[in-house]
């Protein structure tokens, strides 16, 4: 690099100014800045300017809130503040594990599909719904698919479509069912 750049052709005052600026390392954390007197002065000047201009406001940006309607087991419902989960990983693992039972539990496929739409920014109500679904699956273990022993070779399919059914996206929802030998296969 020194073959291409040189301070030799610069005036002495400009070279001194440039070397002073290039030697300043910008701190990445407050504890680094608080050790340098120049950064302390700069921070104090910044706070003073904010106070003089009446632009100093404390804003809490730690959580996002929305309203959700939560219903209890006894049927009572209430509006509550719904916050984004700080750690989405447990929710993502839970919904990921719920994908496998959907092959034999068509009664939960729609709920799992809706829950999987919120994998990146799940809220408390989504986690509560996923946990409620787990309770449902544990309390109703006999609702899986059963294969018939009858030997008919019929393949039957039914389809239903609802225009703008989804309340979040207003997209259409299409459902289908395929039976082979009186047993649900898809």
Image: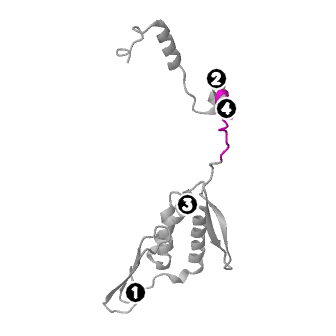
Could you tell me if the residues under marks 1 and 4 are in contact, i.e. CB atoms within 8 Å? Answer: no
Mark pair 1, 2: CA separation: 75 Å
Picture residue at 44% right of the left edge, 7% below the top: 11
Q: Which mark is residue 183?
A: 1
Q: Which residues are magenta?
A: 44-59
In the rendered view, tell whether residue 52 sits above or below residue 94: above
Could you tell me if the residues under marks 1 and 2 are in contact, i.e. CB atoms within 8 Å? Answer: no
Picture residue at 56% right of the left edge, 57% below the top: 88
Percent position of residue 45, x then y? 65, 27
Q: Is residue 113 magenta?
A: no
How does the figure colour the protein chain or chains? Answer: one colour
The reply to whether residue 35 is visible in this rendering is: no
Mark pair 4, 2: CA separation: 17 Å
| SS label for mark 4 | helix
Mark pair 3, 1: CA separation: 36 Å
Percent position of residue 8, x then y? 40, 8
Mark 1 Cα shell of 10 Å, populated few (<14), some (14-19), many (≥20)? some
Please state which of residues 155 and 44 is positioned toward the viewer in this rendering: 44
Percent position of residue 102, x then y? 46, 74
Tell me which numbered mark, 1 or 4, is placed earlier along the sequence.
4
Q: Which mark is residue 98?
A: none
| SS label for mark 2 | loop
Q: Is residue 46 magenta?
A: yes
Please state which of residues 81 and 112 is positioned toward the viewer in this rendering: 81
Mark 4 Cα shell of 10 Å, populated few (<14), some (14-19), many (≥20)? few
> Where does label 2 land, which residue?
36
Tell me which numbered mark, 1 or 2, is placed earlier along the sequence.
2
Q: Which mark is residue 122?
A: 3
Tell me which numbered mark, 3 or 1, is placed earlier along the sequence.
3
Tell me which numbered mark, 3 or 2, is placed earlier along the sequence.
2
> Where does label 4 land, which residue?
47
């Amino acid at each position: 690099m020194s073959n291409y750049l040189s301070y030799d052709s610069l005036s002495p005052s400009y070279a001194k100014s440039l070397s002073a600026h290039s030697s300043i390392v910008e701190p990445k954390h407050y504890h680094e800045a608080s050790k340098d007197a120049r950064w302390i002065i700069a921070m104090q000047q910044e706070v003073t300017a904010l106070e003089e201009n009446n632009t100093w406001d404390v804003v809490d940006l730690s959580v996002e809130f929305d309203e959700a309607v939560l219903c209890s087991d006894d049927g009572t419902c209430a509006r509550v503040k719904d916050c984004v989960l700080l750690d989405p990983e447990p929710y993502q693992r839970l919904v990921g594990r719920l994908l496998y039972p959907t092959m034999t539990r068509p009664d939960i496929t729609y709920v799992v599909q809706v829950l999987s739409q919120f994998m990146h920014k799940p809220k408390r109500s989504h986690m509560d719904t996923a946990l409620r679904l787990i309770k449902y699956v544990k309390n109703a273990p006999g609702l899986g698919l059963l294969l018939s022993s009858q030997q008919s070779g019929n393949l039957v399919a039914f389809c239903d479509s609802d225009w703008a059914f989804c309340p979040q996206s207003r997209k259409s929802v299409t459902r289908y069912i395929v039976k082979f030998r009186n047993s649900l296969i898809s």
